[in-house]
Amino acid sequence: MAIDPNFAESRERSSVGDWLDIDADYDVWGEVDQPERLGIHGTHVAVDFDICDGSGPCLENCPVDVFGWADTPGHPTSDRKAAPVNESQCIDCMLCVDICPVDAIDVDGSRG
Ligand code: SF4
């Protein structure tokens, strides 16, 4: 299952600070029920934490360091997630969308 590109229409919005102790401020979309359900993190650069496998090619290859690790102990697919902590710096190169092995990332320009 890939990230739903229509998440902003179909999901409730909250703030990452409501859920994670992380040095970042971005929106979280969808139902959160920790530790099993974590929702979609970010808007322009959106990462479905419930799909992310924590392998990190996005984090290692993003040319402008948009991603940082978030610890998510107890989540079924991985205990760390690539959080879009600097999403406003994204230059829409689409590398992360192309290399994510589990199709967990959507960047604005890739929608519709
Ligand atoms: S689209 Fe490019 S610049 Fe934007 S987050 Fe992905 S890899 Fe980084």
Image (tube, grey):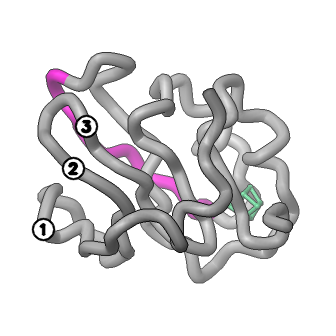
Q: Residue furthest toward the bottom? A: 88
Residue named by callout 2: 32
**Mark 2 secondary-structure assignment:** loop
Q: Amino acid at mark 1?
A: Asp
43 or 55, which is in the foreground?
A: 43
Residue 55 pos. (x, y %) = 54, 23
Residue named by callout 3: 37
Q: Looking at the picture, does residue 106 appear above or below residue 37? A: below
Residue stretch in magenta: 65-74
**Mark 3 secondary-structure assignment:** loop
Q: Main secondary structure of the magenta part?
A: loop
Of pointers 3 and 1, the one earlier in the residue sequence? 1
Asked if the residue under mark 3 is in contact with the one under mark 2, i.e. CB atoms within 8 Å, the reply is yes
Q: Amino acid at mark 2?
A: Val
Residue named by callout 1: 18
Label 2 neighbourhood size at 10 Å, few (<14), some (14-19), many (20+)?
Answer: some
